[in-house]
């Protein structure tokens, strides 16, 4: 186990990601305040998805980790999406 | 037997990390299920949810979001610090993370306190009068943010243990998987909040 090279992420990368995350937070607050009606929901959820992507990729090291993690993690989110879609197909068409 | 145990300590960092991720998956499915419950009830009671969400304080929510994002960065930085062999910085970054977690809980206390003061809590008389949609909204609000706050408390305990172990040298530049796993758990808490915040506070 010891001979695996561990990627050391520079502090600067984390700082930049944090700035992006905070900026996106304020954008989503601003967008939902202007009341873009139905679009604001989609935009807020889209921004949240981008933020989650940033946290997973950089803070949780998926970009630098072994391939197994980069396969497993998207599969779990895919499973969640499938369950959500099936649930809503039921509610929308019953 | 006494001499032989000294070297070749059994350790599997990759296995340990996979274990942590598997635990994170179960947590994602737990909260994922709650998000589905929330979206279905929102779909069935859209007007009530729309009005009820206006009761929540966007300012406190935004402050707590920023607090969690910063704490996520500090804990991520602590893994870089330990790999660079900077123990002092690692301890400082872990300490800051724990303080930010406590700040989040203090905000949550005041936020919940204000709601309860206005009679908005599960089973309250004021809520009974408002109707089914509001009962569902505030029930889910208290349950989901409460479960999330419980995860924050667990995170504070976990990070404190990690801080002590780092100070004692049990977590070192060549043995920091526990620190990384603790960081992964903390990022999970952050991930959940990233979705809770727009769903409860922003989308009205």
Image (spheres, coloured by chain):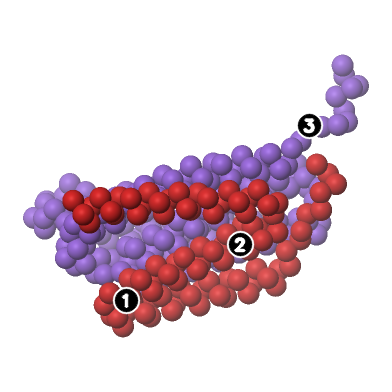
Chain colours: A red, B purple
- Where on the picture, by quarter, is residue B81? bottom right
Same subunit, labels 1 and 2: the answer reads yes
Extreme-bottom residue of the structure = A34
C-beta proximity under 8 Å, tags 1 and 2? no
Residue appearing at x 50%, y 58% in the figure: B190
Residue depth check, mark 3 versus mark 1: number of the one nearer the observer: 1
Q: Quadrant of the N terminus of chain B?
A: top right
Name above or below for residue B19 compared with residue B201.
above
Q: Which residue is mark 1?
A: A39
- CA distance for labels 1 and 2: 27 Å
Q: Identify the subunit bearing mark 3.
A: B
Name above or below for residue B67 compared with residue B19.
below
Q: Identify the subunit bearing mark 1.
A: A
Along the horizontal axis of the image, is A44 left or right of B103?
Answer: left
Q: Identify the subunit bearing mark 2.
A: A
Extreme-top residue of the structure = B1
Where is residue B84 shown, x and y percent of the image?
Answer: 80, 59
Upstream in sequence: badge 1 or badge 2: 1
- CA distance for labels 3 and 1: 54 Å
Residue depth check, mark 3 versus mark 2: number of the one nearer the observer: 2
Q: Residues within 10 Å of mark 2 (few under 14, many from 20)?
A: some
Q: Which residue is mark 2?
A: A57
Same subunit, labels 3 and 2: the answer reads no
Q: Which residue is mark 3?
A: B10
């Amino acid at each position: 186990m010891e001979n695996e090279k561990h990627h050391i992420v520079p502090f600067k990368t984390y700082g930049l990601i944090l700035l992006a995350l905070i900026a996106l937070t304020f954008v989503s607050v601003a967008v939902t305040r202007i009341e873009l009606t139905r679009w604001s929901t989609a935009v807020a959820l889209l921004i949240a998805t981008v933020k989650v992507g940033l946290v997973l990729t950089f803070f949780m090291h998926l970009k630098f980790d072994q391939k197994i993690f980069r396969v497993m993690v998207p599969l779990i989110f895919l499973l969640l999406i499938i369950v959500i879609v099936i649930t809503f197909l039921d509610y929308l068409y019953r | 037997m006494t001499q032989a145990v000294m070297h070749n300590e059994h350790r599997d960092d990759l296995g340990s990390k996979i274990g942590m991720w598997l635990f994170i998956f179960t947590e994602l499915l737990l909260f994922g299920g709650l998000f589905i419950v929330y979206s279905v009830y929102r779909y069935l009671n859209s007007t009530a949810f729309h009005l009820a969400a206006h009761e929540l304080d966007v300012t406190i929510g935004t402050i707590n979001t920023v607090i969690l994002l910063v704490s996520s960065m500090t804990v991520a930085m602590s893994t870089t610090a330990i790999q660079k062999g900077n123990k002092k910085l690692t301890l400082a970054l872990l300490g800051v993370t724990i303080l930010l977690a406590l700040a989040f809980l203090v905000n949550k206390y005041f936020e919940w306190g204000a709601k309860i003061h206005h009679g908005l809590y599960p089973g309250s008389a004021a809520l009974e009068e408002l109707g089914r949609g509001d009962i569902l909204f505030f029930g889910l609000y208290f349950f989901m943010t409460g479960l999330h706050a419980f995860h924050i408390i667990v995170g504070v305990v976990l990070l404190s243990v990690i801080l002590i172990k780092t100070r004692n040298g049990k977590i070192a530049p060549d043995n920091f998987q526990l620190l990384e796993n603790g960081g992964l758990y903390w990022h999970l808490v952050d991930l959940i909040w990233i979705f809770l915040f727009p769903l409860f506070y922003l989308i009205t």
